[in-house]
Image (cartoon, coloured by chain):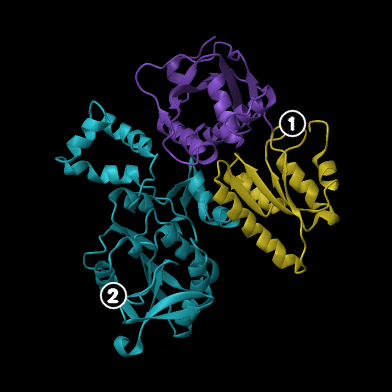
Amino acid sequence: MPSRLESGKEYLVESRLAPLARSAGSADVDSYIRGLRTNVAHHDAVVDALTTNETSWFRDRAPFTALKGSVLPDLIAKGRRHVKVWSAACSTGQEAYSVAITVADDFPALTLSIVGTDLSDRVVERARAGQYTQLEVNRGLPAATLVKYFQRSGPTFEIAPRLRQQVTFRKHNLLDAPPVGGPYDVVFLRNVLIYFDVATKRDVLRRVRSVLAPGGTLFLGAAETTIGIDDAWERVEAAGGSVYRLKEAKAA
Amino acid sequence: MSAVAGSLPTVDGEAIEAIAQDFFATMVDGEHGVLVPGYGEMAPLVDARFTWVDVHGETVTRVLVAVGRSTGDMLTRALLALPDDAPIGDADFADAAGEVVNVIGGNIKSLVHGGGALSLPQVADAAPDCGGAPLISETWFTWRGAPLTLTLWNLPEHAGSAGRP
Amino acid sequence: MTAVRPSIRLEAHPDVVLCCIDWNMPVMTGFEFVVEARKRQEWRDITLMMVTTEGEHDQIVRALAAGAHEYVIKPFTPEIMLDKARGSLACWTRRCRHERRGGLASHGGWRGH
């Protein structure tokens, strides 16, 4: 995710890039940065070093309350036994696994397949490993859930294999064709549209439409909306939260 | 008496670095990148202070942090959220230094084979007597431009401060 | 604190609703404190939250089984503490139903005062 550095924090760039400069054999950070203009291979590493991929379990809570209180019960009422979920811009996988935990806790009869995608190779690898540091499991994960679904493995906590096997992670750019494996009943696309201009937002939302199952649900970040961007969507209240669905006429 | 080098427990140096950096990023600095691994020649510690805990596992691992007193005072202010010019007494210093090694040591416990009870932290003006125990890991950092060392020692069995169940 | 049982400190503060407890303390461990506190009928409504560098699976299970509501492994950020405290206090509020106001107390840590 893009990050903007406040002024006065320039030293952070220096200290975060210093290890990369060292491992690349550059004399100092300045010469490393000059080299970046020609060496595209290092760009991913620089993006990772400069961005804080801080995310949390059950982030913002409301989407998971809506999922549990409305979206999943509705799907089950329609006779669905299997649900497909796309967690877009999934970072290190907490959102995808939070969905798996919600289903395991409250809808044990439901089977689930989740696709988690992110732009960064490194982040996708971490999500796939399902191993989290002590600090990461502190963020938003109730202790009772932690001991139920994670096992300690040295310094990290590892997600239970039965949850991990419900999730597939792959590298994906939201500006490319959506990931195969749809149509998806639920799409999480949170806190990522805010970084795009209107034309790009519209383009991304159109791609999401193309893989959303009939009656499917889209979750956006609290500060995001489809209103004024893509009129095919409508905002619907669901168990105290807001979700987006395709308008009937267009969905038909 | 020193153990044969080949029989010493090994610990993951990168994981130790990450533990220290996570602690500083969250409870001291509020951001990553202020505590950075040092490289090259380490500047000497000025008026050094030592703080340590013992992890009782299959053997006893001593986790020892050393820092210059004035750097330790800055660290105390940062950790206890005191004003920049607050005078730091020995009690506050011991509180903060002990907290540093308690958290780092407790986290390192997960890297130590059979890691069990953790002792209460000790703080002193001189390096503790490790009884000639072998060093199993040595990392140094710079924090706000000053050095800070983090070392792990493999103490003889039954040595070290008592842990609790 | 070394000479004072934690229970005595709590009794002096009847308005306490949340107690943060380190595992590693002089005199008695945080775990022992949770076990003891849970035996006391008059403290039934106090939310007990372990805040400690100890983070073994077994320790978390034991603390929760003994009656701790939440468990925060150090290190933590202010956001993590607030989130965990809010989460466990929300449970407490639901349980109590009636409105009650009180302070937040932090019990000890290993530090002796």
Measuring 29% from the left and 76% from the top, which residue is drawn there?
A209
Residue A201, given in percent of the width and then of the height, sits at: 29, 68
**Horizontal side, residue A99 vs residue C97: left or right:** left
In the image, what residue type sits under mark 2?
Val
A129 and B21: which is toward the camera: B21
Of all residues, the one furthest to the top in this rendering is B1
The numbered disc on residue A46 is none
**Horizontal side, residue A210 vs residue C102: left or right:** left
Which chain identifier belongs to the yellow chain? Answer: C
Instruction: Write down the residue under mark 1.
Output: C112
Note whether B147 is above or below C58 in the view shown. Answer: above
In the image, what residue type sits under mark 1?
Gly
Secondary structure of residue under mark 1: loop
A9 and A189: which is toward the camera: A9
Measuring 62% from the left and 48% from the top, which residue is drawn there?
C60
Residue C73, given in percent of the width and then of the height, sits at: 58, 44
Residue B138, given in percent of the width and then of the height, sits at: 45, 21
A39 and A185: which is toward the camera: A39
Note whether C12 is above or below B137 in the view shown. Answer: below
Secondary structure of residue under mark 2: helix
Q: Would you call the spot at circle 2 few (<14 residues within 10 Å), some (14-19), or many (20 or more)? A: many
Residue B121 visible, this orientation: no
Q: The N terminus of chain A appears in which quarter of the rendering?
A: bottom left
- Chain assignment, label 2: A
Residue A244 visible, this orientation: yes
Rendered hue of chain A is: cyan
